[in-house]
Amino acid sequence: MDALILPALYVLTAGFYDQAHRRGLWTQHRLHHVPPTNTGHIVRRVFELFTIQTVLQWAAPSPPSSPATYGEVDAVVASAARVVAATVVIDTYQYWLHRLMHAVPRLYRHMHSTHHDHRKTQPWAALYNSYAESIVGDVASFALAQWLCALSHSETLVVGALGVCKTVSDHSGYVLPWDPFSHFANNAAYHQRHHTHPGVNFEQPFYTVWDRALGTRGSA
């Protein structure tokens, strides 16, 4: 049952933004006027990637669990700290992989060009990647974060849910005032800038620390 949570979040969030585009809602907050296209092919690929990721995670050995030696409040704080630490690990891993895939033509052609099939971001394509990028990028970064931060099963689901919802928001084509992810520094406008100017704004999905530190942050 847990394996259905992330795909369900993807469908709900991408479908919401898709309908907003098609119905012409909130145009004052819309970044572009290109409605989602070829959604059937995109969704099939994304669900194939979800299946591959689930099989790989099921086959992988379980990470070491953190010792349960806290009081109730301390346990909540420790759990939140592990989740935040995991997002930092994922961002760091994905920044350097993302930048490498743009820097090396062979890697870009065989791994990352699939995601850039769409110059204008669209919500269904938020998780649309090549099989290679999905495994080396998404699966590996989350697995590394899970091991390094000793995430529990529920914490892993929280990190995964945040990653899916934030990535769909980043590809939604909207910066909505009531969308909490729109208030992140690397929101939909920030990532749209990367799709139109691929030499900037590599960091995803949570922070802009590496882009700022290394001078790859472009204006949104």
Image (cartoon, rainbow, N blue to C red):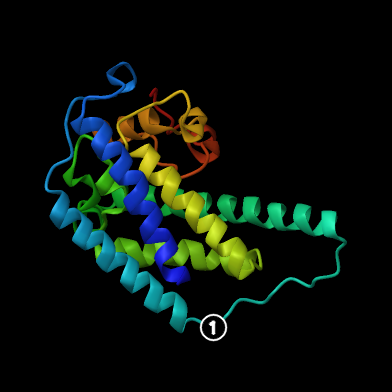
In the image shown, does 144 or 187 lie closer to the viewer? 187
Q: Residue at x 25, y 68 (%)?
A: 48
Res 56 quadrant in image? bottom left
In this picture, residue 194 sits left or right of residue 67: left
Percent coordinates x, y for residue 29 in the rendering:
34, 20
Q: Residue at x 18, y 39 (%)?
A: 36
Q: Where is 64 relative to 124, above or below?
A: below
Q: Where is 53 relative to 209, above or below?
A: below
Q: Is residue 100 visible?
A: no
Percent coordinates x, y for residue 151 in the rendering:
63, 66
- Which residue corresponds to mark 1? 61
Q: Residue at x 48, y 27 (%)?
A: 178
Q: Residue at x 39, y 22 (%)?
A: 219
Percent coordinates x, y for residue 93 in the rendering:
49, 55
Quarter of the image containing the C terminus?
A: top left
Number of numbered discs: 1
Q: Where is 179 relative to 157, above or below?
A: above
Q: Is residue 164 visible?
A: yes
Q: Where is 218 relative to 210, above or below?
A: above
Quarter of the image containing the N terminus?
A: bottom left
Callout 1: SS:
loop
Please rate how many residues cluster around mark 1, counting C-alpha atoms within 10 Å: few if below 14, some from 14 to 19, many from 20: few
Percent coordinates x, y for residue 208 in the rendering:
51, 36
In the image shown, does 170 or 190 lie closer to the viewer? 170
Res 82 quadrant in image? bottom right
Q: Amino acid at mark 1?
A: Pro
- The single residue placed furthest to the left in the displayed view is 38
